[in-house]
Amino acid sequence: MKNCECCNKTKKRTEDEYKSLVNRLNRIEGQIRGIKGMLEKDAYCTDILIQVSAVNAALNAFNRQLLSSHIRTCVAEDIKAGKDETLEDLLFTLQKLMK
């Protein structure tokens, strides 16, 4: 478990959660490589755009999974411990995600 460079916070994930998130990222990485390959092979614009849309959907699914876990664990635990600033942090994060 490493400290985040920007805030010094960490999150110990279960092995299942870690594997699930990494698997999602690996699939997304493969999709990105596929898009690059399409570009290199002069694929038609709309075909590339559709694949980019699929990557965006996959990233959104990754964010939903991570956010759900964050709320169930980090946020819930901090609120139970009386750390109300965590709610402000969550609201700030949601605003950033909704841009």
Image (cartoon, grey):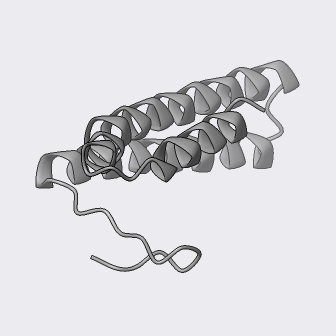
Q: Quadrant of the N terminus?
A: bottom left
Residue at the location (54% across, 80% down)?
5
Residue 79 screen position, x and y as percent: 33, 43
Q: Nearer the viewer, residue 17 or 87?
A: 87
The reply, left or right, for residue 86 in relation to residue 40 is left
Image position of 6 with respect to 90: above or below: below
Residue lying furthest left in this view? Answer: 15
Q: Nearer the viewer, residue 48 or 5?
A: 5
Residue 78 screen position, x and y as percent: 32, 50
Residue lying furthest front in this view? Answer: 82
Q: Quadrant of the C terminus?
A: top right
Counting every numbered tag in the picture gives 0
Q: Nearer the viewer, residue 57 or 43?
A: 57
Whether residue 34 can be seen here: no
The reply, left or right, for residue 26 in relation to residue 52 is left
Whether residue 29 can be seen here: yes
Residue 55 screen position, x and y as percent: 60, 33
Residue at the location (57% across, 25% down)?
57
Image position of 32 with respect to 4: above or below: above
Residue 86 screen position, x and y as percent: 46, 49
Q: Nearer the viewer, residue 20 or 95?
A: 95
The reply, left or right, for residue 67 in relation to residue 90 is left
Residue at the location (22% across, 56% down)?
13
Residue at the location (84% across, 25% down)?
44
Quarter of the image holding residue 20?
A: top left
